[in-house]
Image (cartoon, grey):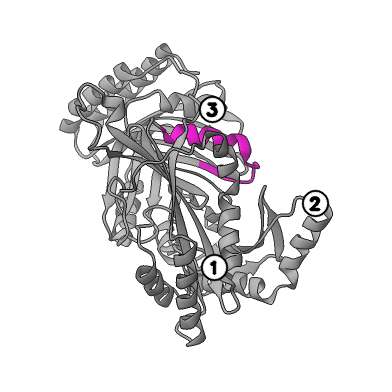
């Protein structure tokens, strides 16, 4: 990994750059950044982040591994409880600032599924410019320092904060501890309630109120010992195929949002847009010959193809006024360790006036995670689901002046803690004063002809790989639900 001297050298280079500009500079605000080449083991970057006490912390890897980032601390944070479109415009304004130094800055972050359904520790939307990051792209690795300044008088305060950040860095990485045993498992909804929700959804579809609605299920695992999102990320990375986006965003030490998503919302490179429809699923079969039949059945199912085409139709409609042309790729099957998905790529050329903010606002959330039409599906979800989705089925990624990429945050978990008021004196037993919660999420698209038991099985299938790794930690002990 990187060493103390390399980091101190990077900070000294940034300080020299800013001090020079503060004497000569006439344009504010500015972003100042420096890059130093490094050579380190990318697989150790999550462990390096896990050893730090400073937040925010972010690990994100592009699914073809063309870009990997480990980001720490914030030089500039933009967040909003609900007005994501306004927040997007503010990020665009930041990226229009003069950049002093090396390379192009990226703002990292994303948004939840619905800004009316947020988690306590996550705002509706958040983007930040990392103070310190490790970046691997195009076969090169860099250590990056950045700061955002609105005026010269701000620099001494930010300089002091950066020096404190460097002094607080931990240079000794410990091996990730194995996951402890969970003491309770709770599905919301349970199987009986799921049957009721599906019946209500299908009745609305029959009446023509909507064509498709995506309902989710939360599986809560409760632990008496600490569990961190970095432990889950390590487990996920060890078990997933490479065509996924592993990610972890921590806004509070020891807690965070983690996942390994197969789905891209969009990628943008100099006005060339790539997006996709990933909807319509079939569980894999253990027998290879039967599994081929299962995969082929995706092309033979009118129901599953219709489910995919609603996503395609939505994307094409939303992009119609933002692009000059669209190209629809061939329909194929994307195979993951436990499930097959129908997959169709879409490419488009953005109009000169179209921004990343326009695309993000237009496409999120797609019918693959909400339903179709959007307004009717949203109303069904709010009526039937009893917990906030938060950042599940949200988006996470980056954008810069000429590039952007976001994944859809499915196959994900929210790791957090809840005070345990039964444990007595918290000051003498701090490790026993909390229950640690891992909320796993999965979703299923309901259309005319959906069968509740089959959709429940699909939800199980999407959770199965994670649960396979968790089974060894199961115990018959249970604690009271709260």
Distance between the alpha carbons at the discs numbered 3 and 1:
40 Å
| Mark 3 vs 1, N-terminal side | 3
* In-image side of 92 versus 243 (left or right): left
Residue 128 makes an appearance in the image: yes
Secondary element at image label 1 = strand
Q: Residues within 10 Å of mark 1 (few under 14, many from 20)?
A: many
Which one is earlier in the sequence, the residue at label 2 or at label 3?
A: 3
Q: Which one is in front, 58 or 456? A: 456
Q: Write down the quadrant of residue 455 in the picture.
A: bottom right
Taking the view exactly as shown, the residue that stands out farthest to the right is 289
Q: Are marks 3 and 1 in contact (CB under 8 Å)?
A: no
Q: Callout 2: 10 Å neighbours few (<14), some, many (20+)?
A: few
Q: Position of residue 475 (x, y in %)?
A: 49, 36
Q: Residues within 10 Å of mark 3 (few under 14, many from 20)?
A: many
Task: Name the residue at the bottom extreme.
Answer: 207
- Is 146 drawn above or below residue 276 in the view shown? above
Cα distance, mark 2 to mark 3? 42 Å
**Residue 324 rendering spot, x and y as whole percentages:** 54, 70
Q: Nearer the viewer, residue 427 or 271?
A: 427
Give x and y (percent) for residue 89. Answer: 32, 57
- Residue appearing at x 48%, y 24% in the figure: 177
Find the distance from the CA under tag 2 to the CA under tag 1.
26 Å
Residue 240 in the magenta stretch? The answer is yes
- Foreground label between 3 and 1: 1
Q: Can you tell which of label 2 and label 3 is closer to the viewer?
A: 2
User: Which numbered marker is on residue 287?
Assistant: 2
Q: Which residues are magenta?
A: 227-246
Please name the residue that numbered disc 1 is placed on. Answer: 445
In depth, the one of 402 and 135 nearer the eye is 135
């Amino acid at each position: 990994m990187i060493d103390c001297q390399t980091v101190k050298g990077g900070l000294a280079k940034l300080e020299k750059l800013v001090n020079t500009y503060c004497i000569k500079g006439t344009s504010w605000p500015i972003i100042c950044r420096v890059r130093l080449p490094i050579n380190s083991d990318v697989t150790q970057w999550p462990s390096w982040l896990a050893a730090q006490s400073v937040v925010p912390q972010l690990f994100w890897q592009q699914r073809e591994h063309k870009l990997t980032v480990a980001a720490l601390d914030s030089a500039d944070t933009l967040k909003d409880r609900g007005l994501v479109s306004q927040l997007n415009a503010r990020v665009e304004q930041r990226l229009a600032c003069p950049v002093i130094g090396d390379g192009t800055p990226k703002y990292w972050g994303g948004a939840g599924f619905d800004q009316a359904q947020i988690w306590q520790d996550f705002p509706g939307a958040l983007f930040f410019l990392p103070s310190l990051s490790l970046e691997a792209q195009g076969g090169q690795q860099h250590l990056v320092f950045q700061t955002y300044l609105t005026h010269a008088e701000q620099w001494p305060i930010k300089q002091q904060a950066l020096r404190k950040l460097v002094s607080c860095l931990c240079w000794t990485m410990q091996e990730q501890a194995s996951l402890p045993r969970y003491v309770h498992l709770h599905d919301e909804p349970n199987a009986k309630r799921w049957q009721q929700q599906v019946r209500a959804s299908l009745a609305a579809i029959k009446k023509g109120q909507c064509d498709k609605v995506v309902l989710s299920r939360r599986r809560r695992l409760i632990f008496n010992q600490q569990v961190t999102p970095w432990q889950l990320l390590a487990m996920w990375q060890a078990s997933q195929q490479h065509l996924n986006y592993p990610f972890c965003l921590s806004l509070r030490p020891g807690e965070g949002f983690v996942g390994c998503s197969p789905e891209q919302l969009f990628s943008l490179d100099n006005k060339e847009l790539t997006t996709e429809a990933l909807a319509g699923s079939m569980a894999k079969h253990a027998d290879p010959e039967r599994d081929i039949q299962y995969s082929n059945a995706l092309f033979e199912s009118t129901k599953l193809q219709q489910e995919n085409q609603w996503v395609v139709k939505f994307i094409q409609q939303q992009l119609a006024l933002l692009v000059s042309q669209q190209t629809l790729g061939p329909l194929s099957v994307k195979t993951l360790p436990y499930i097959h998905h129908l997959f169709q790529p879409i490419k488009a050329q953005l109009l000169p006036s179209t921004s990343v903010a326009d695309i993000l606002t237009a496409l999120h959330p797609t019918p693959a995670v909400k339903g179709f039409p959007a307004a009717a599906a949203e109303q069904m979800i709010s009526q039937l689901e009893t917990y906030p989705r938060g950042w599940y089925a949200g988006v996470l990624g980056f954008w810069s002046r000429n590039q952007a990429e976001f994944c859809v945050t499915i196959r994900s978990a929210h790791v957090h803690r809840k005070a345990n008021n039964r444990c007595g004196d918290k000051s003498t037993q701090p490790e026993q004063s909390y229950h640690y919660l891992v909320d796993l999420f999965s979703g299923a698209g309901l259309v005319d002809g959906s069968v509740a038991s089959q959709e429940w099985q699909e939800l199980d299938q999407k959770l199965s790989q994670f649960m396979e790794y968790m089974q060894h930690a199961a115990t018959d002990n249970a604690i009271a639900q709260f």
